[in-house]
Amino acid sequence: MSITFDSSTPEGTEDYLQVLAPDGTRHPCPELDHWVEDLGIQDLENLYIDMACIRRLDTEGTALQRQGELGLWAPLLGQEAAQIGSGRALEHDDFIFPSYREHGVAYCRGIDPHDLLRMWRGAAPSGWNPYEVNMANQQIVIGAQTLHAAGYAMGLKFDGSNAAAITYFGDGATSQGDVSEAMVFAASYQAPVVFFCQNNHWAISEPVTRQTAGYIADRAKGFGLATWRVDGNDVIAVLAATRAALAHVRTGTGPAFIEAVTYRMGAHTTADDPTRYRDALELEEWAAKDPLDRVAAHLDSLGADLEALKERAQQATDDMAAGLREAITTMPDPEVDDLFAHVYSHPHPWLEEQRENYANYLAGFAENAEASK
Amino acid sequence: MSITFDSSTPEGTEDYLQVLAPDGTRHPCPELDHWVEDLGIQDLENLYIDMACIRRLDTEGTALQRQGELGLWAPLLGQEAAQIGSGRALEHDDFIFPSYREHGVAYCRGIDPHDLLRMWRGAAPSGWNPYEVNMANQQIVIGAQTLHAAGYAMGLKFDGSNAAAITYFGDGATSQGDVSEAMVFAASYQAPVVFFCQNNHWAISEPVTRQTAGYIADRAKGFGLATWRVDGNDVIAVLAATRAALAHVRTGTGPAFIEAVTYRMGAHTTADDPTRYRDALELEEWAAKDPLDRVAAHLDSLGADLEALKERAQQATDDMAAGLREAITTMPDPEVDDLFAHVYSHPHPWLEEQRENYANYLAGFAENAEASK
Amino acid sequence: MKTLTFSQALNTSLRDSMEHDAKVVLMGEDIGKLGGVFRITDGLQKDFGEHRVIDTPLAESGIVGAAIGLAFRGYRPVVEIQFDGFVYPAFDQIVSQLAKMHFRSRGNVKLPVTIRIPFGGGIGSPEHHSESPEAYFAHTAGLRVVSPSNPQDAYTMLAQAIADDDPVIFLEPKRRYHVRGEVDTDLVPEPGSLYRAKVAREGADLTLIAYGPLVKTALDAADAAAEEGIDIEVIDLRSIEPVDFATLSASVRKTGRVVITHEAGKFAGVGAELAASLTERCFDHLDHAPVRVTGFDIPYPPAKLENHHLPDLDRILDGVDRAMRRNAPLLGEDG
Amino acid sequence: MKTLTFSQALNTSLRDSMEHDAKVVLMGEDIGKLGGVFRITDGLQKDFGEHRVIDTPLAESGIVGAAIGLAFRGYRPVVEIQFDGFVYPAFDQIVSQLAKMHFRSRGNVKLPVTIRIPFGGGIGSPEHHSESPEAYFAHTAGLRVVSPSNPQDAYTMLAQAIADDDPVIFLEPKRRYHVRGEVDTDLVPEPGSLYRAKVAREGADLTLIAYGPLVKTALDAADAAAEEGIDIEVIDLRSIEPVDFATLSASVRKTGRVVITHEAGKFAGVGAELAASLTERCFDHLDHAPVRVTGFDIPYPPAKLENHHLPDLDRILDGVDRAMRRNAPLLGEDG
Ligand SMILES: Cc1ncc(C[n+]2csc(CCOP(=O)(O)OP(=O)(O)O)c2C)c(N)n1
Ligand SMILES: Cc1ncc(C[n+]2csc(CCOP(=O)(O)OP(=O)(O)O)c2C)c(N)n1
Ligand SMILES: [Mg+2]
Ligand SMILES: [Mg+2]
């Protein structure tokens, strides 16, 4: 079943593509509508539940950090539509190169809670096995992963694969030379890669205007990429644009770029205090553009059973929270041997020596402690 | 006196601004004409002589390398209009950050032949004192100097100076992250800097299409720079565009970018063999667009005394050549102490030790040689 | 004399340098309103304005490259790299430009750029936030590299680094930012003292060399050793490049034994140079090969393992035992 | 057995690896039609196509970053960096990504990327074309670093580096590209032999350690010393990371004297590690501190001065004299 929509002129739309207004009215968007024709109420409900789940995931992550269970957490609050809309547009074979904030995209990949939290707990350098979920581990060095995506996509092209690569990064990242070089490489080889920029308006304390005077999307155009600038708080628009971009790159005629205009409602990380640098008013403004509320309002207008939906959401998010808690309480501490285990893929004689010497040192320590009892 | 021109439609102009067609006819160019209204026959003759001089400089450089007097030379043949047109647009206080190929710009700065050749001879790491001529030493690391120009221009802005910075680089350089970052910085602080890209179609053996599918100028637009794409073999167009760009950046409203579309007629350097990778036909095509010929043809059509001009040119270029030869024959070899002299600006105890020990070593050597006589 | 934390000492030093010289400008990510993620520049943008305390785009090569340009123009930029692990995108600008410009220009262009880098581990951070990159810079001719270990040095050495006409890599031991100490801001340091090592504790039996974050650990280890009757001389290196070999050699000639400690990996680290140079300079005085107690040669490990990676009091004492050729029951480092 | 130049050996090795494994791809600037500025990839694009021999945009971080992505996808990229001095823009991708990915992914992601770098001086080039950056990479955990010194090793070691599942920095002594030698392309190397040092000349009096371009110089020095009655054992290090300490220590325990030579600057160079480690491992066997004969700690000088900068036969012999505690009339290195 496809959904019909209000054909009145969109109100207050900015210079980006939007399908669902903040108040939940759906309006025509010739560039995008085609890509979400198939969406039924059920699908919208699922997107809503997805977003509710990752919002809960985020709340739990922040809480776990406060309780000392995690060393750090990077909140995604406010960016649910950007992450679910794009994450749900991907095929299983598409390969993701994320930054550190894409817990929502990881959720779309069905990544296990243990694996999600391991790195944030400080228990391991990363979580999941990238090849099991077609998603690379988190990237902390700003922009570095975009080049990996470009290279991976070159490989896809050489292989004649129909899959695509997608890489996530922020507005701040667009200043890094690596991101520009990634666009150069992707364009030069017409590699099937989607550059997905979550413009959440802030790079820690710096507003996006420090990185660029114009639109980020225009920069990508200058590099010859097919470009979409969308309302990043509109899950339907993001889903549509990502599908469109993926379809484009699969034709083999070149890479694509999406600027999802959204907002980081929380702190940069749990170590950050945003009251030092930004205005409460700005937050209020963006709270009015909440990604979940507008889907709920839209579903309401379509006559969906909101109460049932919210119950389902409650159940799903509670399950999610329970899973996370369980993961944390059962997560073993790393072994000393993990220090040395994966530095190289095959033995390295004097690193082996360091490992053995340190083991002996620890053993001597234990003996001493024993002896002095 | 200002010059009137043929107002017929330009023929065969590409997607760039042109004032003087290859056959020497001048046609209207609303974007540029204003900037060269003041140019009289005398000025055109001077530009011609400038170009002849740097062409000769280039011929001599290549010859000196062949004769073993220079270790290497990077020819500028074909790029005379781009370098003279831009170089002559600069004010004395404007500061230049060049690459390694801008002998023509150095010539505009009146740099002494000794200083021009020192580096290429392998006698010193560089030639001139940048502060005497407001031009940094050659830059070999592709693109690195563009950031220096951006930073220098930030300083100009902080100082409230009316001067500008200009930086030269090639088409290949546009792929380097540093060049993108330089545009980001310049735009972010609205720094008075002109990015002058000589698109000579080749980065050693790689055609410009390896670096970008579209126009280089469009990339700069994406970064928010005021942009001109000009016929780089048309000295009037280059002069006009550079004047326009300089005027723009002096308003303090942001940086500018010029793509001068030209061609590297010679080898990348004297160590290169371009027949391995490019077509003789391409060369012929570009030979027909020679920067000097068109000025001569234009002057001819204006009734200038071409013979006298060519005589003046001969004299000037012969003087130039004699100066270069004299410089080479009188250039002293560097001293051993130069190894250590400028590593730091003030003493560094154990480097001093290395210097002394090496001096003793050499002295011992000399003694030994003496003793064994 | 004031009692200041290490970070307050840095902040005060920046402020004083900026007041003293209008050409001093600060550049970095989040150093403005936020005052930097470690608050070292707290309040400075408010007081000096956006042109003196410059929030930059998120691009480290850009930051250092632009700082070079500003220095060309006569400024004295002090760059903050947010964390040690984020200095590598700027490596080319540092190694091929900043370090070489004075030599390239035959002394005509001075680049008095100070690059402040909060470095080292011990704060429970994820990857790239706990690196010790000093060997890369120390191996690069044209750079000077220093690291203070206490609030007074933080204050004085930063002012000296900024006033120096050469580029200086200024490594701040981030896990010591909260340490408090007496700081005399009126102290007029001797010229050249930035590059002198300090005997932080005199001793006769063994020379223990540390810098930055491990000076405190080294002093603690010396106290513990004293209880066992070993009299350790602790040297705070302060300057990694140039190393003050005169002070080091004098100590080693006296004690005949050396232990060197740093957080960075061992292989081709600064400790290798100290060990090799001191062996060259003092071979006939050495009773034992110099012993290195360092981080392992691994990428910086996750937070829950960092205490194993970082040299601590016990590992340093183990190194001391080996250097004393005691029949040490603990054998930690590879020999 | 064929007689090949060093560069032909590399070219043949690349060709054989590409034939052997379809996942091997070459990437770099000007490596296609031009065959690279040193012609190491000559003819390969013609024979294997543009998707196996990939001319890249002019951006080294991009090249290495894209190679990492290709390796993620199962490729085995062999990157050419045009000259040593142009590897620094890729430093972040090498040090923070390539070196750490296996550790970061807990062994799940292998990045079998080989980075070929023509390195070292002696060819009369301008700035940035004669650097010896090996210490930076050797100090970086997660990388392996090797350098062949002769055509046979060039052939064999390159094939082994490409076949290795870890990232390998492959340093080619560019001034030896024209050296000719016998090459057995059918030789099946022992597993692990890539990381073994080679005793290039046996001797009893002193161990002389070199790698890459200076192995030949070291052998010449040993011949010259033999005439003076000094019997030098020359060791070709071959692998800089890991170092084959077993072979080195055995030699030093035998001779009691060590001279180490490289073109790179001395301070915190690879020689420092070799000297420090060998002192640790063989202290009681040493008759003299290890002596280092290296480039000076300066930016690479202009061509007309490079012969002073580069260790040559005489400077190595001077080092030998000092290690032998002869009353050497020549005193070249700082002690
Ligand atoms: C190369 C590098 N420099 C600096 C940092 C420190 N840092 C971490 S996140 C961040 C801001 C990133 O902003 P943006 O790209 O907009 O992503 P967001 O955090 O908003 O998702 C900075 C400066 C880093 N991780 N890597
Ligand atoms: C960072 C860096 N990488 C590689 C090189 C080697 N190199 C020297 S010139 C050149 C091509 C430059 O092309 P372009 O920017 O178009 O300038 P042109 O030589 O055409 O003037 C290359 C690859 C270099 N000098 N610096
Ligand atoms: Mg952001
Ligand atoms: Mg070019």
Image (cartoon, coloured by chain):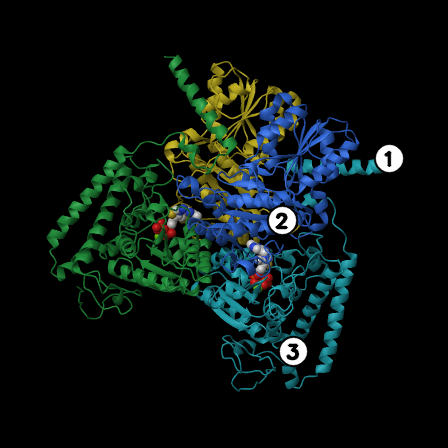
Chain colours: A green, B cyan, C yellow, D blue
- Frontmost residue, D15 versus B134: D15
Q: Quadrant of the C terminus of chain D?
A: top right
Left-right relation of D226 to B235: right
**Element type at marker 1?**
helix
Label 3 – label 1 distance at C-alpha: 65 Å
**Element type at marker 2?**
helix
| Number of disc labels | 3
Answer yes or no: do the residues labelled 3 and 2 have beta carbons within 8 Å? no
Residue drawn where x is 43% and y is 41% of the image = D102
Crowding around mark 2 (Cα neighbors within 10 Å: few <14, some 14 to 19, many 20+) is many
Q: Residue tagged by mark 2?
A: D9
Residue drawn where x is 50% and y is 25% of the image = C333
The image position of residue D141, as x and y in percent, is 49, 38
Label 3 – label 2 distance at C-alpha: 49 Å
Find out if the beta carbon at label 2 lies less than 8 Å from the nearest ligand 2 atom: no
Q: Earlier in the sequence, mark 3 or mark 1?
A: 3
Kind of residue at badge 2 = Ala
Residue drawn where x is 77% and y is 66% of the image = B322
Q: Residue tagged by mark 1?
A: B371
Q: Residue tagged by mark 3?
A: B293
Residue drawn where x is 72% and y is 43% of the image = D308
